[in-house]
Image: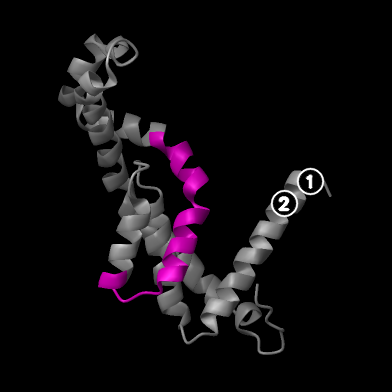
Amino acid sequence: MPRPLKLAHRSLTNFQKSCRVILHQGLSPRSLALAIALGATIGIFPTIWGTSLLCFALAGLFRLNHMAVQLANYMVYPIQLGLTVPYFWLGKLTLPESFNQLSNSRWELLQGNWLDSIDLVLPVMACATTGWFITAPLFGLLVYWCFRILLETPFILSKTQTLTKF
């Protein structure tokens, strides 16, 4: 097996083992699926600065397992980076008037002081966040139902499998 496929298989196996260990610590499949869906949905929020803090706060608010929420948050980090540009374009279609000032002075970000360019970055973040707000409910529901079905199958809930702790 090629090295990237072996690494992906190992990551998926470790994630599945982690889910089993968490599941056998008193979590129901429903609450574990909800924790994973919340962590994944917040994890693809198109800003780098605070997804971990948001996940921590929401897990406490909804009384979900913090470890499961943060695990899902960290697992979708590459997806977050890949979805930032599509979220930006979706937000740009939704909020075209907020983007006019950036198109006129787009190179000011690369020239001069970066503190003066913050007003140029804010419309980009607003567009990307708007795109996320449009797609986040659908993404969260999709992840929730997929993981709920996956975690309620007898394959993962089997008592004959041995659990290994990391």
Magenta region, residue range: 60-84
- Position of 129 compared to 40: left or right? left
Q: Residue furthest left?
A: 97
Q: Give the quarter of the figure containing the C terminus.
A: bottom right
Could you say where residue 63 lies in the image, as x and y percent from the top left?
31, 76
Is label 2 in a helix, a strand or a loop? Answer: helix
- Position of 163 compared to 153: left or right? right
Q: In this view, does 161 lie above or below 12?
A: below
- Nearest the viewer among 154 and 60 is 60
Q: Name the residue under label 1.
A: 3
Q: Distance between the residues labelled 1 and 2?
A: 6 Å
Is label 1 in a helix, a strand or a loop? Answer: helix
At 17% from the left and 25% from the top, the residue drawn is 98
Amino acid at dot 1: Arg
Q: Is residue 55 above or below residue 33?
A: above
Q: Is residue 33 above or below residue 47?
A: below
Could you say where residue 21 lies in the image, as x and y percent from the top left?
58, 78
Could you say where residue 59 lies in the image, as x and y percent from the top left?
33, 69
The reply to whether residue 139 is in sight is no
- Nearest the viewer among 37 and 66 is 66
At 19% from the left and 24% from the top, the residue drawn is 119
Task: Report the label total.
Answer: 2
Look at the magenta stretch and give its main secondary structure. Answer: helix
- Number of residues whose C-alpha sits closer than 10 Å to that of mark 2, classed few (under 14), some (14–19) or many (20 or more): few
Q: Mark 2 points at which residue?
A: 7
Q: Do the residues labelled 1 and 2 touch (CB within 8 Å)?
A: yes
Q: Residue furthest bottom?
A: 159
Amino acid at dot 2: Leu
- Nearest the viewer among 10 and 37 is 10
